[in-house]
Image (cartoon, rainbow, N blue to C red):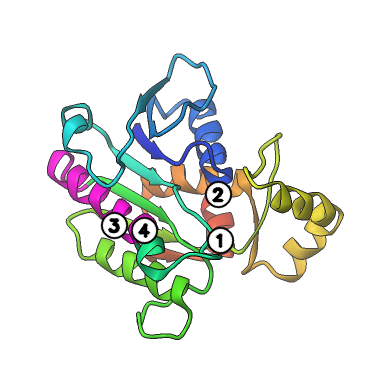
Amino acid sequence: MKVILFGASGMIGQAALRECLLDPDVTSVLSIGRSTTGKRDPKLRELMHGDLADLSSIETELSGYDACFYCLGISSVGMTEAAYRKITYDMPLAAAQTLARDNPGMTFIYVSAAGADSSESGRTMWARVKGAAENALFRMPLKAYAFRPFFVQPLNGIGSKTKFYNAIYAMSRPLAPLMMWLLPKYASTTTDIGRAMIAVARNGAPTRVLDSREMVRAAASA
């Protein structure tokens, strides 16, 4: 399986990259982003690209892939809806449109969030935008899935680019096993999510929207 990965420097992207490099069924990974991952592996190729809303100049590099793991995202705090929509809706749709042309029927996994608003009409801005992106992807000629994580416990040295979030993860680490047991619908690990992406790309899933519990189940089948 050949995988394209967006957002490899973020926490979920790091997890996806780690599991892809470890999985013998994944033969190659193309990481696309504005900065390097700092990783070196025979299976990994990195493509630096400044404008992720327009992939036309690198489109010739994007054919022959089986799956795309779209892990690029940003917090909506302090952002206007237009600015947040550009990153959360416009960019993944641009990637999906390009990849659908070059790899018809490929699997496209979009990392959304618990609480995304599929009706697109709720009062919460980020939820509306995430829901709209999911709906648009589901209408495309791709095997599109939305992952909706909530509490994610980072493992294997993986962390957020935001120091505040890393502090929260460190404080919550002793409680993580309890949260996994008490709140299985809302809790997962970075390993779970990375393994689930590979499993869904390989085998599909019974639903297009996966919450934490469904991601953990998929990871167990990988």
User: How far across and how far down the image is residue 188, in percent?
Assistant: 64, 56
User: How far across and how far down the image is residue 219, in percent?
Assistant: 55, 48
What secondary structure is the magenta-colored segment mainly? helix
- The residues bearing labels 2 and 1 have C-alpha atoms spaced at a distance of 8 Å
> Which kind of residue does numbered mark 3 sit on?
Asp
Q: Range of the magenta residues?
A: 86-105
Furthest-right residue in this view: 174
What residue sits 39% from the left and 54% below the top? 110
- The residues bearing labels 4 and 1 have C-alpha atoms spaced at a distance of 13 Å
Instruction: Give the residue pinned by disc 3.
Output: 90
Q: Is residue 135 left or right of residue 101?
A: right
N-terminal label among 3 and 4: 3
N-terminal label among 3 and 1: 3
What residue sits 45% from the left and 76% below the top? 125
* Disc ID at residue 33: none
* Disc ID at residue 193: 2
Instruction: Give the residue pinned by disc 1.
Output: 149
N-terminal label among 4 and 2: 4
Instruction: Give the residue pinned by disc 4.
Output: 145
Q: Is residue 195 visible?
A: yes
**Circle 3 sits in a helix, a strand or a loop, which is it?**
helix
- The residues bearing labels 2 and 3 have C-alpha atoms spaced at a distance of 24 Å
